[in-house]
Image (spheres, rainbow, N blue to C red):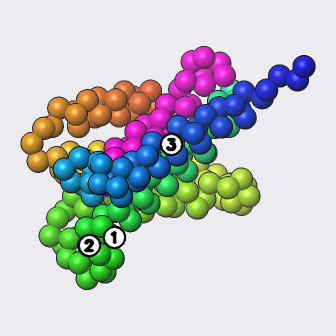
Amino acid sequence: MKTLNPVFVIKVAIHLCALTPLLFNYYWSITDQNGADPVKAIIHFTGIGALNILLLTLLVSPSAKFFKLGWLMQTRRLIGLYCFFYACCHLLNFWWFELGFQVSLFIEELIKRPYIWLGMSGFVILFLLAITSPHSVRRKLGKNWQRLHYWIYPASILVWIHFYWSRKADISEPFLYLTVILILLALRKQKLKNWIRFR
Ligand code: HEM
């Protein structure tokens, strides 16, 4: 009997784990079953979801090295694309449900609330990483591809500040996230040093 390719199995699991809770959350929000404020609930779910997936993307390479599972690296692009997908949903939820798709209101929010600027900067980096993720683009960019993709590190910090700043009261959760981000960045100490030196 032919055994299943582990990359295929993990990729199917990634699709299911990313799409199922998202669809349920939209269904609950649309049918008014997502707490007292279904709009806030879906903005929060997609924001935290994007951040969790971003951290998962950063975890792939150290896990592949530690457990000697080279094939795990083949799942990193898909996980990264889901991070961008959740971030797109998060931005659209805010712009559509809170601001009625009005560009002027969005600009007003950017001016009024600096944490929106930080979220937007993180989003622009994620966008650049997503559009340069196909293998054909990677080949064309050569060494510059890696330089560009190191921007995932400042993006994680920008998004964390956005998260911390958006929290008005309880900041214990953001600090837990900061600890995880700093551990993940510390695992890449040498790469970060090289990037800062040669940028
Ligand atoms: C594209 C620009 C972005 C805009 C306009 C935006 C907007 C917002 C808004 C309005 C909130 C809710 C604040 C409140 O509670 O009143 C929020 C929270 C949040 N955002 Fe963003 N955001 C953006 C980008 C991002 C990105 C790229 C990420 C992650 C990769 C992210 C992660 C989060 C997180 C984790 C929260 C906190 C959710 C919670 O408290 O449960 N945001 N954002």
Residue at (41% x, 52% y) in the render: 27
Q: Quadrant of the N terminus?
A: top right
Indicate whether 187 appears above or below 148: above
Tell me which secondary structure the magenta stretch mostly adopts.
helix
Judging depth in this view, the residue of 103 and 177 nearest the camera is: 103
Q: Residue at label 2? A: 99
For the residue pair 40 and 157, the one nearer the viewer reads as 40
For label 1, the residue is 96
Assess whether residue 158 is covered by the magenta stretch. no
Q: Residue furthest right?
A: 1
| Circle 3 residue | 20
Alpha carbon separation for disc pair 1 and 3: 22 Å
Give percent across and percent down for residue 29.
33, 54
Given contact means CB atoms under 8 Å apart, are the residues at marks 1 and 2 in contact? yes
Q: Which residues are magenta?
A: 42-69
Asked if residue 78 is positioned above or below residue 32 in the image, the reply reads: above
Residue 71 in view (yes/no): yes
